[in-house]
Image: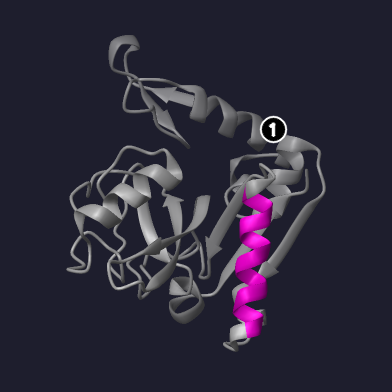
C-alpha cells in the first residue's frame, strides 16, 4: 500500500479508501499482495484460491456452462446453491472475461468481476408464479445490473419487495436503490448471459 501526496491529502495506489474513509480493504489487499509476491501477481486469479487462502477450508467450484438447460440439471444447481448458503458457506460468483478489458456483459455487470452471493430464495407473485432469485452484492459499492428484476423491471410489486426483505434480512428496495451494492437477479441470469464460476467454502 503506497501513498502519494501530502499528509493531509494522501492518495492510495493499488486500492482506495472506503466511503467512510476506512483503510481495511487496502490493508487486506496489501496482505494479499505480500502472499502473492507483488500487486501485479495479486491483480488477477481465481476466486477459489482467495477463499482457500482466507479461510483455510476446502472449496468447491463449478461453472454454470457445465450445466445443461434441462430442468433436472438446473434444479440440481439451484439445490446446491441453496444448501451451501443454508449451511453458512461463503459464496462468490465470478463473471467471465479478461481483466485487461473494461466491459460489461449482457446483464450490465463488469466482466472478469467477482460478486458475493448472499442468498438464494423463491419469490411468489399474486398469480402463484414462482421465481428463483439470488441476492448479489457488488464490491464496487454500486452496480449496473440491467436484466430481469433490475431496478427498471415493471414486474416489481410492493409484495415482492417485502418478500425480498423478509427472505434476506437486507433492508433495501430493488426498484429504487440504484446506488446500493445489492441487487436481485434471476437464478438463470448468468446461465443465459455470461459464464459464471460459483465457488463456496465447505463447512
Residue 153: % across, % down: 21, 67
Q: For the residue labelled by badge 1, is the local secondary structure a helix, a strand or a loop?
A: helix
- Snapshot quadrant of residue 76: bottom right
Q: Is residue 189 above or below residue 167?
A: below
Q: Is residue 46 above or below residue 111?
A: above
In reply to whether residue 73 is colored magenta, the answer given is yes
Query: Which residue sits at x=31%, y=71%?
Result: 148
Q: Is residue 21 above or below residue 98?
A: above
| Segment colored magenta | 72-85
Residue 104: % across, % down: 36, 68
Quadrant containing the C terminus in the rendered view: top right
Query: Which residue sits at x=76%, y=58%?
Result: 60
State the residue in front, 161 or 10: 161
**Is any part of residue 152 visible from this angle?**
yes
State the residue in front, 18 or 66: 66
Q: Please identify the dominant SS of the magenta region.
A: helix
Residue tagged 1: 34
Mark 1 surroundings within 10 Å by alpha-carbon count, few (fewer than 14), some (14 through 19), many (20 or more): few
Total numbered badges shown on the rendered structure: 1
State the residue in front, 41 or 160: 160
In reply to whether residue 81 is colored magenta, the answer given is yes
Amino acid at each position: 500500500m503506497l501513498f502519494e501526496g501530502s499528509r493531509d491529502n494522501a492518495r492510495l495506489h493499488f486500492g482506495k479508501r472506503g466511503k467512510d474513509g476506512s483503510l481495511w480493504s487496502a490493508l487486506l489487499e496489501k496482505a494479499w499482495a505480500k502472499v502473492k509476491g507483488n500487486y501485479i501477481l495479486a491483480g488477477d486469479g481465481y476466486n477459489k484460491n482467495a477463499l482457500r487462502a482466507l479461510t483455510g477450508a476446502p472449496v468447491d467450484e463449478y461453472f454454470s456452462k457445465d450445466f445443461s438447460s434441462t430442468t433436472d440439471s438446473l434444479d440440481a444447481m439451484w439445490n446446491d446453491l441453496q444448501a451451501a448458503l443454508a449451511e453458512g458457506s461463503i459464496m462468490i460468483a465470478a463473471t467471465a472475461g479478461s481483466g485487461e478489458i473494461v466491459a460489461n456483459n449482457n446483464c450490465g455487470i463488469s466482466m472478469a468481476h467477482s460478486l458475493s452471493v448472499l442468498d438464494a430464495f423463491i419469490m411468489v407473485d399474486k398469480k402463484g408464479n414462482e421465481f428463483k432469485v439470488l441476492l448479489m452484492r457488488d464490491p464496487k459499492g454500486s452496480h449496473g445490473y440491467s436484466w430481469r428484476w433490475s431496478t427498471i423491471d415493471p414486474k416489481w410489486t410492493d409484495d415482492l419487495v417485502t418478500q425480498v426483505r423478509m427472505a434476506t434480512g437486507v433492508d433495501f428496495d430493488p426498484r429504487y436503490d440504484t446506488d446500493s451494492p445489492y441487487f436481485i437477479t434471476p437464478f438463470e441470469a448468468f446461465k443465459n448471459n455470461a459464464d459464471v464460476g460459483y465457488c463456496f467454502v465447505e463447512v
